[in-house]
Amino acid sequence: MNKKIIVIGSTNLDLVFQTENFPKPGETIKSKDFSMLSGGKGSNQAIAASRLGGNVSFISKIGNDDFGQRSIKELNLSKVNCDYVFTDHEAVSGVAVILINEKGENSIVMAPGANNLLSVSDIDNASPIIKNAAIILIQLEISIDTVKYLLKTVASSESKIIFNPAPMHLLDDWMYAKIYLITPNESESESLTGIKITDIETASQAADYFLNKGVKNVVITLGAKGAFFKNKDEEFHIPAKKVKVVDTTGAGDVFNGALAVALGESKNWREIIKFAIAASTISVGKLGAQTASPYRSEIISNN
């Protein structure tokens, strides 16, 4: 069953520079290549989920500029419902500068622009689709106050909230109990729990922190090492296939979008995590975030 997925989050234009190495403080280096690509964690996740077969609506805020319109066009091409992407006529759309070195690693600076202005009233205006969502996927490239309001508003509904705590922001204790599935990476997990993840045992300890706070399910992404899952009934680690890495930008967003789709299809947890790892593994073999986001047919042909 193709359940309704709502993604709430950011929309950016990504200015991507490919370099041999990251510049040191005070150093000027030449870029080997340059691209302008639509991005933003929310937009990336919405496109990832839609391309993988999800019935996706997106809630976001853009500026009244060419960057914002470009993002809407990309979302529409991937069949994402943008009826509740709001426009602010004063602010500019979000922009991110992304440096990618020869190892495929990235360094990112983001100017949130209109993303910071996605407001409580916008969430109220979008309530017709929010209240009917089976799954709600949120990140932290929008106002934390809006995120908190969203958690309080949908807490009594049947929606399953997937919470991607990126970029990292400390959470109030009450927020954890509202989360069905939390999806930090290793560094985000360490910042939130105080536990440095060095192996599966420490990943399990970090997961226990979230579970004890009231989160129902935990996935900690481990980069090239795959992902670790734990809830009150089971825990396991699923490794990722080794592939040539071109660009890791957006891989975590693809992972989260895939989680939302697989969860909506009522797969078991092992199937859900395997599906998400397969999707994100394909994405790191291509340049960009949204441009690298795979379609469902690619997952099938690569497994």
Image (spheres, grey):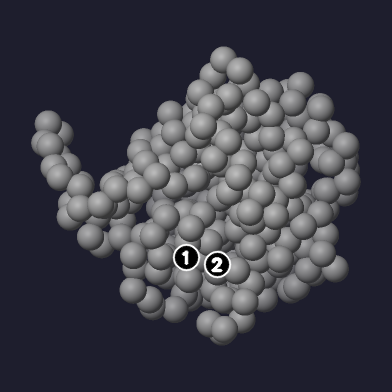
Query: First in sequence: mark 1 or mark 2?
Result: 1
- Name the residue beneath numbered marker 2: 294
- Residue 150, position in %: x, y? 74, 33
- Residue 5 appears left or right of 176: right
Kindly give the residue lying farthest to the left in the view shown: 27
**Type of the residue with mark 1:** Ser
**Type of the residue with mark 2:** Pro
Asked if labels 2 and 1 touch by Cβ distance under 8 angstroms, the answer is yes
Residue at 31% over, 56% down? 105
- Name the residue beneath numbered marker 1: 283
**Residue 83 in the image: above or below residue 121:** below
Is 13 in front, or is 207? Answer: 13
Residue at 50% over, 38% down? 12
Residue at 57% over, 76% down? 298
Quadrant in the picture for residue 85:
top right
**Residue 113 in the image: above or below residue 198:** above
Work out whether residue 4 can be spotted. Answer: yes
Is 79 in front, or is 155? Answer: 79
- Residue 124, position in %: x, y? 81, 27
Work out whether residue 193 can be spotted. Answer: no
